[in-house]
């Protein structure tokens, strides 16, 4: 596996979490019931996964590709995608703080659309160019660096608890 494959796997997980969250939200009846708090927990997992993914791209992939004229515009667009996605996540968080799962269908749909657009931009345009420009060895090195960073973050999170 290489860094691009790992990031593509993240994309699948993120889109799955969004669709599950949307499905769960449609079945929420009473926000005071413990089972209806599941969407809040799922949102936390989505936010964490998405934030970790975006941070990984911004620290490890985008700087490498920003050096090439062929990918500079795509990288800039991806940064803008991350900013838009982060803004939607913050809006959903505010709604959740006010009242669990209250009127966030539109925001969840907007988040899904932005993430899907971002995934297409990366997987159809940026990642193929990254493979050509960076090569297999660099992408494998990137995979191990991502894994090492994520496992040390997990250890830090466990120590905090």
Image: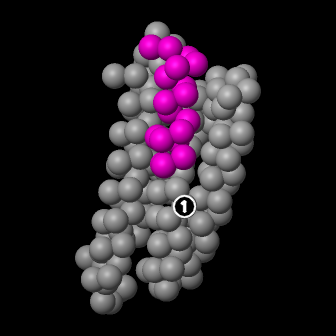
97 or 78: which is nearer to us? 78
SS class, disc 1: helix
Q: Is residue 145 visible?
A: no
- The spot of residue 98 in percent (x, y) is 56, 82
Label 1: which residue?
Answer: 114
- The spot of residue 102 in percent (x, y) is 48, 85
Residue, far bottom: 30
Quarter of the picture containing the C terminus is top left
- Label 1 CA crowd tier, 10 Å (few <14, some 14–19, many 20+): some
Residue under the image location 52 percent in, 20 percent down: 132
139 is higher (above) or lower (below) than 118:
above
Q: Which residues are magenta?
A: 119-136
Tag count in the figure? 1
Q: Quadrant of residue 65?
A: top right
Residue, far top: 137
- The spot of residue 41 in percent (x, y) is 38, 64
Q: Principal SS element in the magenta part?
A: helix
Residue under the image location 45 percent in, 29 percent down: 4
111 or 148: which is nearer to us? 111
Q: Is residue 13 visible?
A: yes
Q: How is the image coloured?
A: one colour
Quarter of the picture containing the N terminus is top left
**Would residue 134 be counted in the magenta stretch?**
yes
161 or 135: which is nearer to us? 135
Task: Say left or right for 144 vs 13.
Answer: right
Task: Say left or right for 134 vs 157.
Answer: right
149 is higher (above) or lower (below) than 15:
above
Residue under the image location 64 percent in, 23 percent down: 64
- The spot of residue 121 in percent (x, y) is 54, 46
**Would residue 74 be counted in the magenta stretch?**
no
Residue under the image location 35 percent in, 49 percent down: 13
């Amino acid at each position: 596996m290489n860094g691009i494959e790992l990031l593509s796997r993240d994309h699948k997980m993120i889109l799955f979490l969004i669709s599950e969250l949307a499905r769960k939200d449609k079945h929420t009846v009473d926000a005071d019931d413990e089972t209806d708090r599941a969407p809040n927990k799922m949102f936390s997992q989505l936010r964490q996964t998405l934030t970790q993914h975006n941070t990984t791209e911004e620290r490890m992939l985008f700087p490498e590709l920003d050096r090439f004229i062929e990918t500079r515009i795509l990288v800039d667009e991806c940064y803008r995608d991350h900013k838009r996605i982060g803004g939607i996540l913050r809006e959903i968080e505010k709604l959740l703080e006010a009242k669990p799962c209250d009127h966030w269908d539109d925001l969840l749909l907007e988040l899904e659309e932005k993430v899907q657009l971002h995934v297409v931009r990366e997987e159809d345009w940026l990642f193929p160019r990254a493979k050509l420009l960076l090569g297999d060895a660099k992408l494998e090195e990137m995979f191990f660096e991502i894994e090492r960073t994520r496992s040390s973050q997990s250890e830090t999170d466990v120590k905090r608890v």
